[in-house]
Image: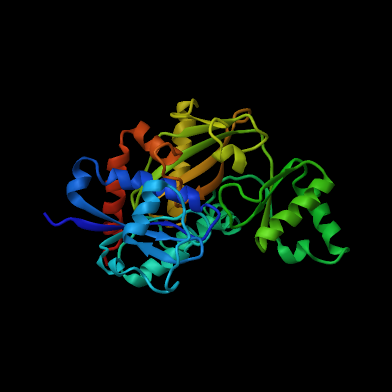
Amino acid sequence: MTKLKVGLLFGGCSGEHEVSIVSASSIAKAFTIDANADKYNMLPFYIQKDGFWQGGDIAQQVLTSGKPISATGKSRWQFPATASEVDVWFPVLHGPNGEDGTVQGLLKLMQVPFVGSDVMASSVGMDKIAMKAAFAQAGLPQVKYLAVTRSQIYSNPCVFPKLCDQIESELGYPCFVKPANLGSSVGISKVRNRPQLEAALDSAASYDRRVIVEAAVVAREIECAVLGNDQPQASVPGEITFESDFYDYETKYTPGQAQMIIPAKVPEPIVALIQERALQAFLSLDAAGLARVDFFYVESTGEVLINEINTLPGFTSTSMYPEMWAATGISFANLVDRLIQLALERGQP
């Protein structure tokens, strides 16, 4: 049987470069397990932080070591020769320039199937303001928020105080200030007063020209994994618990700072509602392949509020996405196989 050549694309030009390498290393191992070893031939492709593409031994070295490199590249616009052999791409690129539609557009131009969402769902899923507008249109309940631009934040001394007044009036304290287009909780601040709000807005604007401010809620953070294309399935939900003030970058990536509870210990009607809304969110963006949808469960009122969708979630052996599917009955290796088959299905005319 002729093996399908899968291009594993990882690294990338974002602050989540190292996380991408770890995810890709886990996926690479899945190609050596059971039936996958007979069906697929994995070809590694590493995008350095400066944008240069590396294949072959150099890409494999990064996968094996788990550490980024900065070898000299010939051209940002020249792909390794083996790129032309790829039958299906498996991008494992987190954050900007990876899951925001940019690489997806490149792969579309290559006219080769790839795992995950197309350009539109990827870009909308990455931009928190566009994402929330799409969710509102789909009738999904969410926390109150305001969209702000860098020009408003960096405006003259008469305009900026009025912006802060509006935020205080409509959202109150505490609230969260976030860059619209960054992942992994980068640039996010929880604020409780005017000086903190001013500093947080200034910080977020340094990362992105679009900023979102959200009202804080006292709630449990529940996540649900989605798998499929036009008829997706939802996994059992999982819960993230932590001792810090909120789920910031340090908490997310420091071992022992956060715990995963899978399945989440919530009432069955809430489980069903979370799964229903996860699928609704997935379909509202026309997402494909995979996504993790995050919710706030307000226990005191029974409300389930959608927080965000991640169209290319972390994929390490201990990440929430594969762990939720493992608890639902799909092993890591089988999950990788299913995603490739879904990519081939979606890639058909």
- Residue at 47% x, 33% y: name it: 238
**Closer to the camera, 33 or 88?**
33
Is residue 53 in view from this perspective? yes
User: Splitting the image into 4 quarters, where does residue 3 fall?
Assistant: bottom left
Visual colour scheme: rainbow
Q: In this view, does 19 lie above or below 101?
A: above
Across and down, in percent, residue 327 comes to 37, 31
Where residue 94 appears, as percent x and y from the top left, is: 48, 53
At 45% from the left edge and 49% from the top edge, which residue is drawn?
Answer: 67
Taking the spot 40% from the left edge, 57% from the top edge, the residue there is 117
Report the number of discs.
Answer: 0
Question: Relative to residue 85, is residue 172 depicted above or below?
Answer: above
Quadrant where the C terminus sits is bottom left
Q: Say which quarter of the image contains residue 152.
A: bottom right
339 vs 41, left or right, is right
Q: Residue at x 70, y 59 (%)?
A: 205
Q: Residue furthest right?
A: 158
Q: In which quarter of the image is the N terminus?
A: bottom left
Q: Is residue 100 left or right of residue 187?
A: left
As drawn, 253 above or below 149: above
Q: Can see residue 90?
A: no
User: From the viewer's perspective, is residue 8 above or below residue 276?
Assistant: below
Q: In the figure, is residue 308 to the left or right of 229?
A: right
